[in-house]
Image: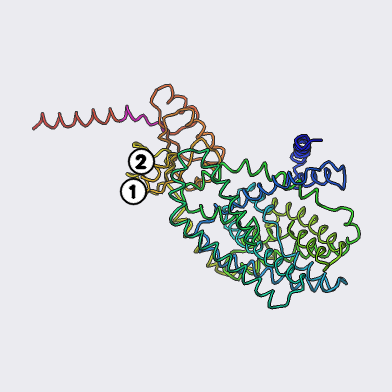
Amino acid sequence: MTVYQELALLLLLAAGVGALAVRLRQPLIVAFILVGMLAGPSAFGWVQAHSEINLLAQLGITILLFVVGLKLDLHLVKNLGPVALATGLGQLAFTIFFGYLIARGLGIEPITALYVAIALTFSSTIIIVKLLSDKREIDSLHGRISMGFLIVQDIAVVIAMVLMSTYGAGADEGALGMAALMLALKMVAMLAVLALLMRYVLPRLLHHLAHSSELLLVFAIAWGAALATAGDMAGFSKEVGAFLAGFSLASTSYREAISSRLTSLRDFLLLFFFIDLGAKLELGTLGTSIPEASVLSLFVLIGNPLIVLAIMGYMGYRKRTGFLAGLTVAQISEFSIVFAAMGVSLGHISIEAVGLITLVGLVTITASTYMILYSQPLYAFCRPWIGVFERKKPFREMAFEHSRKLETEADVIVFGMGRFGGRLAKELHTQGVAVLGIDFDPEVARLSMRHEVPVRFGDAEDPVLVGTLPLASARWVVSTISDTDLNLSLVKALRHHGYEGNIATTAHLAADGARLRQAGVTRVLQPFEDAADFAAKTLFDEAYQGAKT
């Protein structure tokens, strides 16, 4: 088969298996990994275009981590950075220490036990982000904290691989320390350059690019790929570079528009990541390590979430938040297998150890996928036994909720910040009403921000954008857009995302107003007629008062 024919066959197989999984109420991630296993060398052997599939998978990972970075602005990093760092480092230390002891207790040799223990610490950022995104929990408190300590893990992966490869080259302790120091210096330099670009270059550049939605999308992908490449060349992973690329744009008003346009492309390209992961699983090496893999899998599925729950409870978060965040580390990563394979190439461990880690990865990835998808029923079941992990007053989470409430809630959301919408938003803001403006014209958005009205750059036609708005607190959603079909689409998207509040839209014709009312619009604004009525009333009042005097 040609590469095109092979990709077409994989897409058809993925669509068929995916449809069966949906019918059986099974996670698509597990279905797509199964597709890779079926198409890989352990089954039918259809996958031959490894480089092409891997390239598409790498682009999907880049876009995925880029979108995650877009969700974490500087304020969130300031508030959630300490708990993410403490949880990430605490989980790493716990898993390495006890994982090594368990591996030694199973009769595994010291150097192999060390590799196994380190491999057990790495969670799959890609799979977790995909699951949380599908559940719309990526913006939740536990989702953001999870992203923080998963990035800490990704950096730890890089450090571990650098140190172990340096150790494999026969270097002494001084060389190991120098390698770690150089890696830290490169990270500091990259962050310094990025800070300058965030301050002086990127906001102005995005403002000019935003006049074309297609160009804005192309730039976002190019920027993510460029920083992923830079991170890889500097000795970090592509994932860290892509995350920093998204983070550099997170404080701009264009992040939601960029994120919503990348969602579909991200989901399509990640299909190849899961297929590639399944195709790389060496099933022939799995049968010899089932008892050891069972013990280590239970340790990952239970021990990792418990240590996260304990650390977050101690730091002042509720048990529910700690429990849900803990579930995200209840599996090992595809990088765990890569790390073990590196150990084989260096002569540190045998191929049987790779089979052991692969089996643990297969079990924990599958089990944790179900645990995260059904996290709420699982929490309800475990709730009576995990109260010991919560302080009487979860002060840190309470303070975070208060600050986020002040920043994200809006009483009125106004689509279209032109002359009519901008004046409406300004008057409401003057009266003390919390207003959030949405406009697709970057120039209008920039000028509106001068009046202290928060404005997001976004398109009312984008249903994904509607899902990111603070609809729970909004009492009114007002559209000053004159396009009736666009207003009808907006009403449909609002109802789809569970908004049950009041909706006001603009209409210039009576027939359009009737269509909008039939669609469930609470109030139809008719600017010309309203202005004429107001002018007539004003003139009449003045004339009447003048006649009396």
Q: Is residue 243 left or right of residue 46?
A: left
Residue 422 is labelled as 2
Asked which secondary structure carries label 2, the reply is: helix
Q: Quadrant of residue 176?
A: bottom right
The amino acid pointed to by label 1 is His
Q: Which residues are magenta?
A: 523-530
Residue 117 in picture, x, y percent from top left: 77, 68
Q: Determine which residue is flagged by label 1.
A: 451
Residue 228 in picture, x, y percent from top left: 61, 54
| Residue 533 lies in the magenta-colored region | no
Residue 213 in picture, x, y percent from top left: 50, 38
Image quarter in which the C terminus is found:
top left
* Residue drawn 44% across the image and 43% down it: 208
474 or 363: nearer the viewer: 363
Image quarter in which the N terminus is found:
top right
Residue positioned most to the left = 549
167 or 152: nearer the viewer: 167
